[in-house]
Image (cartoon, grey):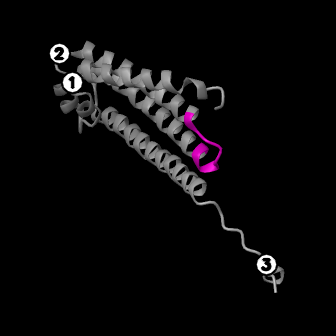
């Protein structure tokens, strides 16, 4: 994690660029990830298979960059490190979702409802893990900030009071 600390800004730049590419390449990419069945998935893709495959590839880069950024941003408190690893687990689920999305686009008319459901399940796992990780990381950050702002008050033991 310490080795990645110097890469925070480049990783953030890659994540932002990849996110922009997803939005440009796949105008309905989020709707595609949330499609309720194979028919809706195919309807969203339409005749733009190449665009959505390219958006899926950009999402692969996005997930990898935000996973590394989470590890690079982790701080010494245990909650912060657990949060970073939880975001990494979410990114792994995101990569599974991305692979399934690309495979589903390639499947075309052979796409089944169960494959779309599997993709959505990976997406749910992604959001749960990332949300938990962000809550842990931000919580650790807030607690650390409060400790720095309000140093502990040291009291003398009652027997040490001047008399």
Mark 2 against mark 3, which lies toward the viewer?
3
What secondary structure is found at the residue carrying circle 1? loop
Residue 111 falls left or right of residue 134:
left
Disc 1 target residue: 27
Asked if the residue at tag 3 contacts the one at tag 2, i.e. Cβ–Cβ closer than 8 Å, the answer is: no
Q: Range of the magenta residues?
A: 73-81
Label 3 vs 1, first from the N-terminus:
1
Query: Regarding mark 2 in the picture, which secondary structure is present there?
Result: loop
- Horizontal arrangement in the rendering, residue 11 relative to residue 160 (left or right): left
Residue drawn at 61 percent across, 43 percent down: 81
Query: What element does badge 3 sit on?
Result: loop
Residue 36's label in the rendered image is none
Q: Quadrant of residue 33?
A: top left
Residue at 26 percent of width and 28 percent of height: 29
Counting from the top left corner in percent of width and height, residue 11 is at 49, 24
How far apart are the two marked residues, 3 and 1, measured between alpha carbons? 66 Å
Which residue lies most toward the top here?
50
| Precedes in sequence: disc 2 or disc 3 | 2
**Label 3: how many Cα within 10 Å (few below 14, some 14–19, many 20+):** few
Q: Position of residue 104 (x, y in %)?
A: 31, 24
Q: Earlier in the sequence, mark 1 or mark 2?
A: 1
| Marking on residue 157 | 3
Q: Are marks 3 and 1 in contact (CB under 8 Å)?
A: no
Figure check: 7 above or below 131 = above
């Amino acid at each position: 994690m310490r080795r990645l600390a110097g890469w925070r800004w480049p990783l953030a730049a890659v994540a932002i660029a990849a996110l922009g590419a997803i939005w440009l390449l796949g105008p309905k990419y989020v709707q595609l990830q949330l499609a309720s069945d194979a028919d809706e998935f195919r309807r969203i893709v339409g005749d733009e298979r190449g665009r959505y495959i390219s958006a899926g590839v950009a999402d692969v880069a996005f997930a990898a960059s935000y996973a590394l950024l989470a590890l690079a941003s982790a701080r010494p408190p245990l909650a912060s490190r657990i949060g970073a690893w939880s975001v990494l687990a979410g990114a792994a689920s995101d990569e599974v979702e991305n692979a399934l999305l690309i495979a589903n686009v390639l499947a075309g008319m052979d796409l089944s409802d169960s494959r779309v459901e599997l993709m959505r399940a990976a997406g749910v796992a992604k959001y749960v893990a990332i949300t938990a990780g962000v809550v842990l990381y931000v919580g650790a950050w807030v607690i650390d900030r409060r400790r720095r702002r309000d140093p502990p008050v040291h009291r003398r033991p009652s027997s040490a009071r001047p008399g």
